[in-house]
Amino acid sequence: MLETLLTFGKRMDAPEIPSTERRRSSRFPIEREIRYKTLNQRAELLTGVGKTLNISSSGVLFTSEHDMPLGTRLEVSISWPAQLNERCLLNLVARGRVTRNAKGQVALQIQQYEFRTQSRPARDK
């Protein structure tokens, strides 16, 4: 089965995806700073920083200094490479559940997300 993609108004046929591929969304190798915190109210609050390894519309894989059990609810904030109106820095803030945790890497299934503006550091006078 071939999927049809629209790229800048042109139709392109995408190669067939092997049947062993289970991902619903394409992953993009984007390395950005990420901050995370747990949302589970009954467990100890964990916060930390890391780097994203790849991102898709449904998940993010990132480095972590914590071991987090599967199903842990997290909120992550990722410094986004694009700016709003070419001057306002953005963060992608997403919430979801840990689906994989191995070798200092955590996979988060995104359940909801939003872009938030980021405050700029104060300039020295």
Image (cartoon, helix red, strand yellow):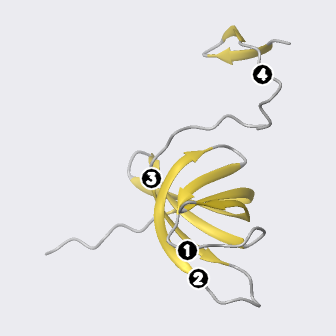
Dividing the picture into quadrants, the one containing residue 118 is bottom left
| Residue annotated with mark 4 | 18
Looking at the rendered structure, the kind of residue marked 1 is His
| Residue annotated with mark 1 | 66
Asked if 21 appears above or below 50 in the picture, the reply is above
Are the two marked residues, 3 and 4, in contact with CB atoms closer than 8 angstroms? Answer: no
- Judging from the image, what secondary structure is the residue with disc 1 in? loop
Picture residue at 31% right of the left edge, 70% below the top? 121
Q: Residue 34 in the image: state x and y as whole percent.
A: 49, 62
| Residue annotated with mark 3 | 32
Question: Which quadrant is the C terminus positioned in?
Answer: bottom left
Are the two marked residues, 1 and 2, in contact with CB atoms closer than 8 angstroms? Answer: yes
Looking at the rendered structure, the kind of residue marked 3 is Arg
Q: Residue 75 in the image: state x and y as whole percent.
A: 64, 70
- Which is nearer the N-term, disc 4 or disc 1? 4
User: Between residues 114 and 73, which one lies in front from this camera angle?
Assistant: 73
Which of the labelled discs sits on residue 46, or is there none?
A: 2
Q: CA gap, disc 3 to disc 1?
A: 18 Å
Q: CA gap, disc 3 to disc 4?
A: 29 Å
Mark 3 or 1: in front is: 1
Looking at the rendered structure, the kind of residue marked 2 is Leu
